[in-house]
Amino acid sequence: MLIRSLLFGNVPPLRCFSSSALNILKTGDILRETRVFTDEDVLEYSKVSHDSNPLHFNSELARNAGFEDRLVHGMLVAALFPRIISSHFPGAVYVSQSLNFRLPIYIGDKVSGEVQVINLKENKKKYLVKLKTKCFRNDELLVLDGEAMAILPSLAVERVRSLD
């Protein structure tokens, strides 16, 4: 099974291929990235999305609402999925995503996003891929899951430099 893990920053990706020497995507393969969401991430996302819910900015209000502290926007966390796909398959088109928000994510939590291939279908020299999507808080608690569909130009797994 192909597993990729990337900590944002200067930490190199961990590569583990058990299927073959070629980096070709197969059913069952998992691509994974891990990051920590910061105050700045939440502020910048709020500016772009116009989501200024005080649960993201006011610790006291968040605690009074039953949370441990300020929340990271769920859609910001879910943005890990298209990032994982596009960083490994330049030119991919993200077609759909279902999401189930299971538990909150707090600023400073380590979040691991992963996509697992559950179906591959070739169509006109492109590939329609169905993916199981999951995010874990601190490597153990499932906080977000769903399914996604993407059109890939190739099954060759690459690692593209990001803009961050």
Image (spheres, rainbow, N blue to C red):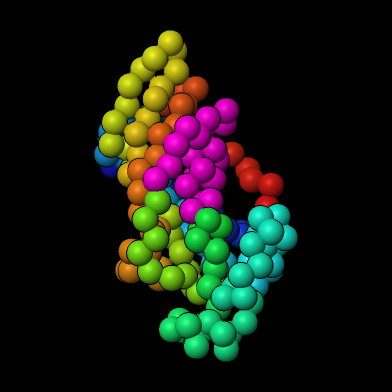
In the image, taking residue 68 as reference, residue 26 lies left or right, namely left
| Position above or below: 105 against 75 | below
Indicate the position of residue 31 as horizontal and vertical percent values. Answer: 40, 45
Viewer-proximal residue among 163 and 99 = 99
| Position above or below: 53 against 34 | below
Marker count (numbered): 0
Indicate the position of residue 127 as horizontal and vertical percent values. Answer: 41, 22
Q: Is residue 21 visible?
A: no
Residue at the spot x=57%, y=89% of the render? 60
Residue at the spot x=34%, y=34% of the render? 130
Residue at the spot x=43%, y=60% of the render? 112
In the image, taking residue 28 as reference, residue 87 lies left or right, namely right
Residue 49: say if magenta.
Answer: no
Residue 86: say if magenta.
Answer: yes
In the image, taking residue 42 as reference, residue 84 lies left or right, namely left
Viewer-proximal residue among 42 and 65 = 65
Q: Is residue 70 visible?
A: yes
Indicate the position of residue 77 as horizontal and vertical percent values. Answer: 51, 58
Work out which quarter of the rendered image holds the N terminus and state it: top left
Viewer-proximal residue among 56 and 106 = 56
Give the residues in magenta: 78-98
Residue at the spot x=40%, y=51% of the render? 99
Would you identify the image quadrant in which residue 150 lies? Answer: top left
Viewer-proximal residue among 44 and 15 = 44
| Position above or below: 136 against 87 | below
Would you identify the image quadrant in which residue 26 lies? Answer: top left
